Image: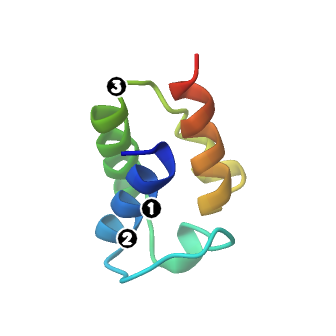
Amino acid sequence: MSSDLVVRSHWCAVLGVAEADAGDRFFETGGDSLLAIDLIQRIEADLGVEVPVEVLFTDGSLAALIEASTAAAST
């Protein structure tokens, strides 16, 4: 499964939404700090990489999280 699909799948599961757009922002969609940690841990477990949680606090968009996850997976 691609990084994009993994991130989107976990994003939707953690936030309890059916679908997500690249411009969606984590905290504006109902996320909080505990859910942020849960989301990052799920992504890291599936992709086997470390993803900086800061991306959710600085940018917060799904697109930024996908970019960070893809970058981590390609190193």
CA distance separating discs 3 and 1? 16 Å
Q: CA distance from mark 2 to mark 3?
A: 20 Å
User: Which residue was labeled with disc 2?
Assistant: 12
Residue 15 at x, y = what percent?
Answer: 37, 72
**Residue at left 32%, top 39%?**
41
Q: Residue at x 45, y 77 (%)?
A: 30
**Residue 69 sits in quarter:** top right
Q: Position of residue 65 (x, y in %)?
A: 59, 49
> Of the residues shown, which amino acid type is indicated by label 3?
Gly
**Residue 14, picture quadrant:** bottom left
Q: Residues within 10 Å of mark 3 (few under 14, many from 20)?
A: few
> Marks 2 and 1: in contact by CB < 8 Å?
yes
- Residue farthest to the bottom, as pictured: 18
Specify the quadrant that holds the C terminus: top right
Q: Amino acid at mark 1?
A: Arg
Residue lying furthest top: 75
- Judge whether 45 appears above or below 7 on screen: above
Q: Is residue 1 above or below residue 14?
A: above
Secondary element at tag 3: loop
Mark 1, secondary structure of its residue? helix
Q: In this figure, which residue is indicated by the disc labeled 3?
A: 48
As measured in the structure, the alpha-carbon distance from the residue carrying label 1 to the one carrying label 2 is 6 Å
**Callout 2 environment at 10 Å: few (<14), some (14 to 19), or many (20+)?**
some
Residue on which the image places disc 1: 8
Residue 2 seen from this side: yes
Residue at horizontal 58%, vertical 49%?
66
In this view of the protein, which residue sits in the foreground, 63 or 53?
63
Q: Residue at (29%, 37%) from the top-left corner?
A: 46
Residue 6 lies, in percent from the top left, at 38, 51
Measured as percent of width and height from the top left, residue 58 is found at 71, 49
Would residue 3 appear left or right of 17 to someone viewing this image? Answer: right
Quadrant in the rendering for residue 11: bottom left
